[in-house]
Image: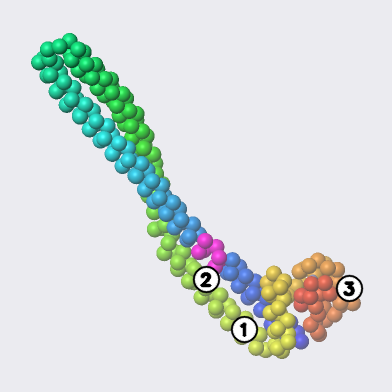
Amino acid sequence: MKKRLEILIQMQKIDTIIGAKNILTNKLPQQLNSLKQSLKDADETVEITKSEMDDNLKEQKLKELDIANNNTKITKYKNQLLTIETNKEYKALNSEINHLEKLNSEIDDDLIKLMEIEAELKERMDVEKQTQQKASDELKANEKRLEIEIQEVEKEIINLKEQRNNLAQDLPRDLIRRYGSLIKKRNRKAVAFNENNACSGCGYTIRPQVVIDIRKGNSIIYCESCGRILVAKL
Ligand SMILES: [Zn+2]
C-alpha cells in the first residue's frame, strides 16, 4: 500500500508540472499573437495616414489647378480689357476679373490649410512609422523563440504524461480512474496532505482517527469533504 501511495505522490508531482506547462501552452501562443497583432495594428495605422496624405496631396493639386485656370482667365480678360470699347462691357469684365482674383485668394487660403494638415500628417506618420518599426523588430526578435518554446512545451507535456502513465501501470484500474477524475475535477490536485490536521486541498478538518490512519499509510484514505487522496506528506 505504501508503494501505491508513493506512486500517487509521484504522479501528482508530475501532474502539477503538467498543469503549469498547460498554462504555458495558452500563454505562449497568446504572447506570439499579441506581437503579431501589434504589428498588424501599426501597419493599418500607417496605411490610414498614408491614404489621408494621398488625399491631401490630390486636393492640393486640384486647388493649384483651379488657381492656374483662374490665372489663365484673368490674363485673358486683362488683355481683352485693352480692346473693349463700351463702359458697360469694361465694368462687367473688370468685375469678373475681381471675382476671379477673390476666388483665387480664397483657394490660396484653403491651400495653406491643406499644407498645414500635410505637415501634421507627416509628423504623425513619423511617429507611426517608429511604432511600426518597433513592433516589427519585437516580432522578429521573439517569433522564432516563442515558436520553439511552444513546440518544446508541447513535447514536454507529452513526455510528462508518458512518465505519469508509466507510473500508473502499477496501480489498480479503479484507483487510476479515481485519480484521473480528481485531477480533472479538483483543479489538478488529486493528492492532498495532512496539514496541521486539515486537508491541504480543501481545508476540511481531518478526524483524529483518520489522522492516525493516514500516518500508518496502510490504506488509501480520501478526504471526507473534497474526496482527494490524503497522504501524510507530499
Ligand atoms: Zn479535502
Q: Amino acid at mark 2?
A: Val
Q: Which residue is mark 3?
A: 207
Q: Quadrant of residue 130?
A: top left
In the picture provided, is 9 more to the left or to the right than 77?
right
Magenta stretch: dominant secondary structure: helix
Q: Are marks 2 and 1 in contact (CB under 8 Å)?
A: no
Secondary structure found at label 1: helix
Tell me where residue 90 appears, x and y as whole percent. 17, 13
Q: CA distance from mark 2 to mark 1?
A: 18 Å
Q: CA distance from mark 3 to mark 2?
A: 41 Å
Q: Which residue is mark 1?
A: 165
> Which residue shows up at 42% across the image and 57% down it?
139
Q: Earlier in the sequence, mark 3 or mark 2?
A: 2
Tell me where residue 142 appears, x and y as whole percent. 43, 59
The image quadrant where one finds the C terminus is bottom right
Secondary structure found at label 3: loop
Q: Amino acid at mark 3?
A: Arg
| Magenta residues, start to end | 24-30
> Which residue shows up at 65% across the image and 71% down it?
16
In the picture provided, is 65 more to the left or to the right than 183?
left
The residue at label 1 has a CB less than 8 Å from ligand 1: no
Foreground: 59 or 93? 93
- Judged from this view, the residue extending furthest toward the top is 87
